[in-house]
Image (cartoon, coloured by chain):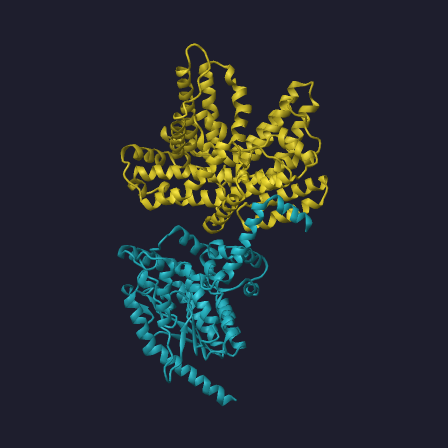
Chain colours: A cyan, B yellow
Amino acid sequence: MNSFISYSKKVPAFTITVLLIVIIEVALYFIPNLHYLEGGGSFFTYYKKQIAEDKKQSFDILLLGDSRSLSIHGVKEKEGEFTMYNFSLPAAGPRYFKFFLKKYLENHSNPKLVIWAADPEQFNHTKSKTFDTDKNLWNQYKHRLLNLFTFPESFEQYKGGELLFIAKEYLPLMMYSFKYRQGFGDLLNGLKMETFTNRETYHTKQNHMIETITSNHNGQINLGDYFIADENEVAKSYVKYIEGLDKVKDFDIEPLVDFLEYCKEKQIKVLVLNIPRVDGLNQTKFFQSVVPAIREKTAKFPNAKYLEFPKMDYPLSLFSESIHYNSAGDKQLNTDFKTYVYPEIISYIKNSDKKDKDEK
Amino acid sequence: MIFNSVDFILFFPVVYLLYLRIDHKKQNILLLIASYFFYGYWDYRFLSLLALSTVIDYYASLGIEANSENPKKRKYYLYLSIFSNLGILGFFKYFNFFVKSAVSAFGAFGIQMHEPTLNIILPLGISFYTFQTMSYTIDVYRGDLKPTRNFLDFALFVTFFPQLVAGPIERATNLLPQITNERKITFENLKQGAFLILFGFYKKVYIADNMATIVDPFFAQGDTLLTRTGAEAFLGSTAFVFQIYGDFSGYSDIARGISKFMGVELIRNFNHPLFSQNINDFWRRWHISFMNWLRDYVYVPLGGKNDSEFKQHLNSMIVFVLSGLWHGANWTFVLWGFFWGVVTSLYRILRKITAPKDGSKRPPTNKYMVPVNVAFTFVLVIFSCFFFRGQDITTALTLIKKVFLEFGTVDPKIVMKFFRLAIPFLLIEFYQYIKDNEYSIFELKTFYRVCFYLFIFYSIIIMGNCNKNEFIYFVF
């Protein structure tokens, strides 16, 4: 200790700097809502995480999915209806759902139903690799997964080399100036973003807008509304997309099975929902093999049911870039959901509730 | 393993804490193991190459010493070292280049040949450690150095991890005694080391990696190359000067800083080259360890300054073309070397013409001319970078043509970004340059030093590009 003090006296500037850094980092730890400074993608993750952790708000139905299912409107509290919140997040892979649900359950009682609405494309074998072996995959998902879970929470999600890899990724995030570096950096540079709204605006303003839209629709936001794509490019990417999935046959639905097991153990009902995609995609080799496998696996779980939209093939004109729905696609999807799917969901909940009671 | 990674941030403190607790002999063993781990972390398969180079040069140097009375055998051992090092380097770095060039040359004469498809991975830092070990054997052959009999010490000289993959290219006369003898860690060592590490990271992750985001689009190939303006090309190349300087000197600073923590002094590799007043001055300040190597082992043996005027020009051309080839197996690097060879010769001729006729000493440069000279030298460096950074000769020449014939405009936002990065950096460098002391920051008052450290630290943490970009010179 004495030698430390004598060294500190010899380098006063260094010592003062270290102290100031400690003070700044501790202060940042206590400043609320720093995530509003971040870009839309990161903000969205923090925002949904906050809702899942908020003990004051609970929902009857939780919808978990990806950027496509994010287009489905949640259901607000109305007499005689179940509330539904859309917790979908874009590009976070199929493995996190179980742990996200766990997070929700740590703060709330069991919901009446959980909808698994992730696109089966998430089961493409190229997306099921471990992150330490496929760094590109990690780079795609990391900004969501690192923000969605704390390190102790992640500790049980990974093992071996992958856990070590993830731990190293968490390490620099202990410094809040590093954790929110994108937001601070843009703020200090006076940069305005053009990515999400196609208008120049600061992240904070943009995030408040995202918050309003998402909150009005109980978790929904249609990402396709914000993609502007050239028609020729869309046509080209459509052909490529179909061709690509016509070659792939390998898939890994283990994350879904794991999720269903977990829900069974927690006595939670699950609806595995398959949502419409662009014409021709359902006929590709990949979907022809993965969808029956999902159906078959789901049928083995007494607490789960598989359900499809009445029309599973939408024309390309309803998509912004062959994956995400444009505003017309969004409208069609939500009409179909409200007219056909939601009543099915309600009757599934009611029937299985009745069945449960009868069995008791 | 790279310095700007969490792996290294975990690796170094562990090694260092152990280092502080053991005696000198064990320290060397620890550093050797750590160095092999550091290198093998990238690709363990190439550890054998490192070991091979070590074994050959160790025995070659002992062979030279043992045959002091037999010049033929001495030469044999020298050639064994040189050819095996150059053989390793030639195969891994230049095989594909020579095959491709030969196929194109035959193609020009109407003889169609197929390129053999041999996918050779370039071992990290191969150009650095092969040059370092070669210099050792040559020094022993010349009688400038007595070979070490301690194999472990020699192995550590070859693999010392701070400078293994991107230099500075150390001489055995400097590094080996520091390995053999006990090292002392002084307070000054720690202070200077910490500064070098901090400033090195600033240069790498803040300056170089952010400059890369300006450079890369301007040097991209394809259709966009034709739509690029001369102004964009010029800005791109200027930003590249900062990128390559920040990247390479940043690495050297971190390497020196880490070494200082262990009581080892590595050679200074850069001495504010951006403020060079002429070409000779630039090459005395840029990549010093490599230029010294070329001077001592290529230029001087070729005849150096004692040769005829014509041979001096030729020798300098050979040195620069070799320097270009050392950087990479690509014709752009050869042309880059050729460019510097020509420019150096022109400068030498100009100096001779403008020298006082009566043979008296040249008067010092007018102080108002200094900034002009610095700017002119800097512009030459910018132009050389079109060859250094361009993917191929067509790209480099197209961009240079654009600068002269279609200058046009450039997005002011990108210009602003460039200045935001460059100006604070230049101010710091300028302060060190005029004080002729890289640690001149220590002379500032406490308040200014605190501001400086906070600025550097948060530039790295908040605005540094932390996408784990490797150092450019790793692939050289």
What is the quadrant of residue A276 in the picture? bottom left
Q: Residue A96: percent from the left, percent from the top? A: 49, 66
Q: Residue A209: percent from the left, percent from the top? A: 35, 65
Q: Is residue A290 left or right of residue B400?
A: right
Q: Is residue A33 left or right of residue A315?
A: right
In the picture as drawn, the residue positioned furthest to the top comes out as B358
Q: Say above or below: B164 vs A81.
A: above
Residue shown at 68%/49% (left/top)?
A: A2
Residue B113 seen: yes
Q: Is residue B209 left or right of residue A220?
A: right
The front one of A146 and A302 is A146
How many marks overall?
A: 0
Residue shown at 57%/65% (left/top)?
A: A156
What is the quadrant of residue A114 in the picture? bottom left
What is the quadrant of residue A39 in the picture? bottom left
Residue B468 seen: no
Q: Say above or below: B333 vs A2.
A: above
Q: Residue B364: percent from the left, percent from the top? A: 44, 20
The front one of A283 and A24 is A24
The front one of A358 and A141 is A141
Q: Say above or below: B463 vs A119.
A: above
Q: Residue A297: percent from the left, percent from the top? A: 48, 73
